[in-house]
Image (cartoon, rainbow, N blue to C red):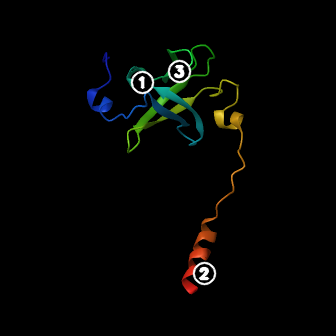
Amino acid sequence: MPEVLDPTISARLKRDDAGLVAAVVQQHDTGEVLMVGWMDDEALRRTLTQGRVTFWSRSREEYWRKGDTSGHAQYVKAVSIDCDGDALLVQVDQVGAACHTGARTCFVAGGDLGAVVGDRDQQVRDQENEEIR
């Protein structure tokens, strides 16, 4: 197992001021977004090489592997980097709850913010009306 993250991968990452990259965690078979965590090079190396997801805890300032204390593990199925290198998509097989509150996802626990729902068909109608004028 490599002791450091592959330099070609590391060079593609755009980290924040703390050296971290956002990692969006998604259930591999349903597409359900489960949570967002933070990774530095070491957390990503562990995730890529150990088959379980490891994050950097900003509050505790230590590495933590999802499920080691709760039993709600995340088994890695795939890891992708976005086009800008500033976010990772970690597809997993989630065992139990992903959120520390006990909810399946952190986004159910956080709740809907009540955004106005867009309508693509309305946009087309608006464009057609603009062209008529």
Q: Earlier in the sequence, mark 2 or mark 1?
A: 1
Q: Residue at x 45, y 26 (%)?
A: 39
Estimate the x, y position of residue 43 in percent, counting from the top left.
Answer: 43, 21
Q: Secondary structure at mark 3?
A: loop
Give whichever of 2, 7 is nearer the camera: 7
Amino acid at dot 1: Asp
Vertical comparison of 63 with 86: above or below: above
**Residue 64 image offset from top left, x and y in percent:** 52, 17
Q: Which residue is mark 3?
A: 58
Q: Which residue is mark 1?
A: 40
Q: As displayed, is residue 77 above or below residue 115?
A: above
Circle 1 SS class:
loop
Structural crowding at the residue carrying mark 2, measured as other residues with C-alpha within 10 Å and reported as few (<14), some (14–19) or many (≥20): few
Residue in the image at 38% along x and 39% along y: 85
Q: Which mark is residue 129?
A: 2
- Vertical comparison of 125 with 69: above or below: below
